[in-house]
Image: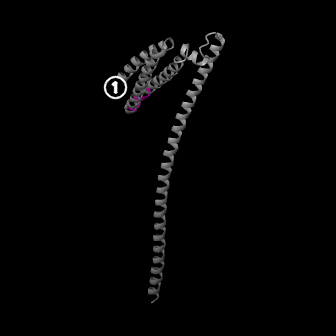
Amino acid sequence: MSSDFETYEQDFGTLTAEITNKVGKIPKLSGEEKTQLVLNVDKQLEEVRELLEQMDLEVREIPIQSRGMYNSRLKSYKQEMEKLEKDFKRSRIAYSDEVRNELLGDDGSSSEGQLIKLREERAHLLDNTERLERSSRRLEAGYQIAVETEQVGQEILANLHSDREKIQRARERLRETDSNLGKSSRILTGMLRR
């Protein structure tokens, strides 16, 4: 089981190294070359996400006593993935002539200070977008938990209803038995008097 995990780790290392290399090249490119590289990195990031899912599945099947070590390794890989995604987003806009021209028109005479300010604002917007995406994922997970909790609650209520009916039937039987015992007692008392 752990050998599969280690194979995934090797694939993860290879892919992330390639992505890091390509992410470093993106800001220096423009036009079709840049578009192709961005699409390629996007595809590789999707492969890394799938690898992480496979690793997660493997960790769940590892015996509990060994699982902690693999969980911590998986957690660090997920953090590395988040950093890669953040670097990728930033690399697409940082120092790019194409983006500069979009933001400023074709006017290259703007001061360096304005360019820096625009880059900072853009990076800030990207950070906010990432936060929103994380919040959306948390909300989705919370909603899923709420749905599951509601289903469990409905099952519990159904069980309680069934138990209540059983208790009521048992109570009715006890009353009938008590009534029958009372009749029997009166009949026996009558027979003893005779």
Q: Is residue 96 visible?
A: no
Q: Which residue is mark 1?
A: 4
Residue 145, image x, y percentages: 51, 42
Q: Is residue 187 visible?
A: yes
Q: Residue 102: which quarter of the image? A: top right
Residue 88 counted in the magenta span: no
65 part of magenta stretch: yes
The residue nearer to you, when weighing 118 against 177, is 118
Q: In the rendered image, which quarter contains the N terminus?
A: top left
Find numbered disc 1 in the image and state the secondary structure of the residue it sits on: helix
The residue lying at 43 percent from left, 18 percent from top is 36
Q: Residue furthest bottom?
A: 194
Magenta-highlighted stretch: main secondary structure? helix
**Figure check: 174 above or below 33:** below
Q: Amino acid at mark 1?
A: Asp
| In the rendered image, the vertical position of residue 85 relative to residue 60, given as above or below | above
Q: Is residue 185 above or below residue 13?
A: below
In the picture, the quarter occupied by the C terminus is bottom left
Which residue occupies the foreground of this view, 89 or 13? 89
Magenta part of the protein: which range? Answer: 63-68
Instruction: Give the side of residue 60 with respect to residue 109, left or right.
Output: left
Residue 50 image point, x, y percent: 40, 28
In this view, the residue in front, 48 or 185, is 48
> Where is residue 119 shown, x and y percent of the image?
60, 17
Farthest front residue?
106
